[in-house]
Image (spheres, rainbow, N blue to C red):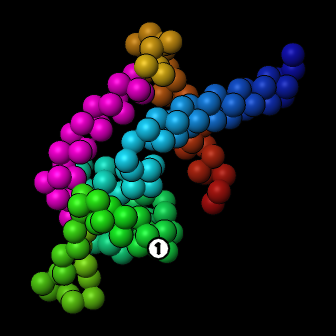
Amino acid sequence: MTEQNSRIKAFTVFIKSSQSVQKLIKQDFLKKEINLNEYGVLELLYHKGDQAIQSIGKKILMGSGSITYVIDKLEDKGFVYRKPCPKDRRKIFLCITDEGKKYMETRVVEQEALINTVFEELNDSEVAVAIDLFKRIGIHAESLLK
């Protein structure tokens, strides 16, 4: 196999394996009461604390129209609430409720277990190599965008 063909094969395998992992994650979310977008917002709040609503979309790669819909759904479930900024009336913060924290404490453990199951095929040194390779590919792809 030529070098060019092996790179095309590597790309194909990379994309197919990524799609399989994404399907597994989506399948797992179908069993839960929140979807992947809602989880992304909750996870951000859970790990980083209160966030200005205007900045959430950029941090989790979601459009502003979608963010409003997702926040409304999370609010209906009692997982988040909006809090006006005392210094700037135009700014509104999104905050996680105690119920949202409790949900995430369980959900994060479940998510980590699923991810560990996906990677159990690799030993620790192979995981380290995979991280390095994926990071290098991502950084190089980003550099090609500019």
Residue depicted at x 13% and y 54%: 98
Residue 96 lies within the magenta run:
yes
Write down the region rendered in magenta. 95-116
x, y (%) of residue 31?
44, 38
Q: Amino acid at mark 1?
A: Ser
Where is residue 42, by image quadrant?
bottom left
The answer to whether residue 118 is visible is: yes
For the N terminus, which image quadrant?
top right
x, y (%) of residue 78?
23, 61
In the shown orientation, is residue 20 left or right of residue 5?
Answer: left
Secondary structure character of the magenta stretch overall: helix
Q: Is residue 33 above or below residue 67?
A: above
In the shown orientation, is residue 36 left or right of residue 90?
Answer: right
Q: Is residue 107 above or below residue 70?
A: above
| Residue annotated with mark 1 | 64
Residue depicted at x 80% and y 30%: 8
